Image (cartoon, rainbow, N blue to C red):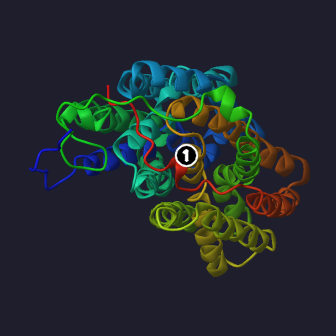
Amino acid sequence: MTQSAVSPRFYYGWIIVPVCLFGISSGPAAFGLASMGLFSEPLAQAFGWSRTQISGAVSAMMLATALTMPLVGRLVDRWGARRVLLPSIVLLAACFAVLPFVTSYAQFMAAYIGMGTIAVGTNSVPYMRILAAWFDRRRGLAIGIAGSGTGLGFAYVPLLSEALISRFGWQGGYFGLAAVLLLVTLPLVFFLLHETPAQLGLAIDGGLAETGEEAGEAQGMTPHEAMGRRDFWVLATIFVGLAFVLYGLIPHLVPMLVDRGIASGTAALIASIFGLSAFGGRLLIGFLIDKYDARRIAFAFFSLSAFGLLVLAMSAPAPLLVLVAILLGGSLGAEVDMLAYLCSRYFGLRSFAQIFSLLFSAVMVAMGLGPLAFGMVFDATGSYGAILALGVPICVAAIALVLLLKPYGERSRGAQISQS
């Protein structure tokens, strides 16, 4: 087995990364969740819905996603990511495009549930599967960069939504989000995204594919084997707790700040800082986990969430809220990307999409219940204080559970993914 002496100077995997980044930034987690804080007030004025009802649509989307995500994992492992992504992007755009025509809460809810069912393939599972195929030695960095798409979405979606709503109304805002999906995301995925390096005659991490070498089968565990490991359940518990708190906060952050007397424009800016911090946090985390034990990095970043939440619960002044946004956003940056990385290292790539989708489904349940819980507490008490106070010990417990994770070691490195 010899490798060609000629190697490409530029690895196409670094084209794959920004395509995945933007794809994730325009998925339902960003478009559906990060935009809700800007649509909630116009929707309340137009239909008289409560914050619990409005945030309940996001919760329904997340819960529907949790139920259908394992199916996506099976389809991605069987058919490939592109065959799942392309129709799902069109369907997600359709869900946003029908929202301006809703006349009842049931129709509104149905559109958001559609984002979590028929359009569930636009979530991060297909993108993470592709990234795992293209990278091994720098997998953490690649996942960190692409996974920061969620943070990028949390940064630009509030500003984009506010601009669209201010000029065209809430109906035009939803049409605008649908247009981004059809005119930007869909062409990028169709023309630039390739499943594996072998499709372009390349080897994983760069270089030319070895002449005459047959593609190896992906190494790792089956879903059943992974679920028999303690690490699987520890990971699930850690990330479920953090998702409940951090994603529960996102759609309520702008209304929460406005309730404290902060102007809506300033509140949107703070929300964007939150998103930018998640973006930057993911880049930093991706770089660090390729060099250091990911468990230590998780412990450090998750500690920031507990401190930031504590400060937020104390009704901090506006300047200090910028620090809170940075701390909580940075913690959010350690969320799904860290889970994907640890999943690939602990359980291998043989059934990566299925195992990751199982863990991600549990996280999505928490993402769905979090916004609903925040809204219910506000409607019952007129304040977010109680739910913020509950979030602090949840974050502390997640930090403690990191200590129970076993070392993943070097045994998982070099596990190749099928190049067929």
Say few, some or many: other residues with alpha carbon within 10 Å of mark 1 (under 14 / 14 to 19 / 20 or more): many
Where residue 379 sits: x, y (%)? 85, 47
In the image, residue 117 above or below residue 46: above
Q: Residue furthest left?
A: 6
What residue is disc 1 on?
340
At 58% across and 20% down in the image, what residue appears?
A: 71
**Of residues 123 and 284, which is closer to you in this image?**
284
In the image, residue 263 above or below residue 323: above
Three-letter amino acid code of the residue under disc 1: Ala
Q: Which quarter of the figure has residue 261?
A: bottom right
At 45% across and 51% down in the image, what residue appears?
A: 143
**Of residues 263 and 249, which is closer to you in this image?**
249
Is residue 52 toward the left or the right of residue 213 in the image? Answer: right
In the image, residue 308 above or below residue 51: below
Task: State whether residue 47 appears in this view.
Answer: no
Q: Which quarter of the figure has residue 156?
A: bottom left
Where residue 66 sits: x, y (%)? 66, 30
Is residue 186 toward the left or the right of residue 177 in the image? Answer: left
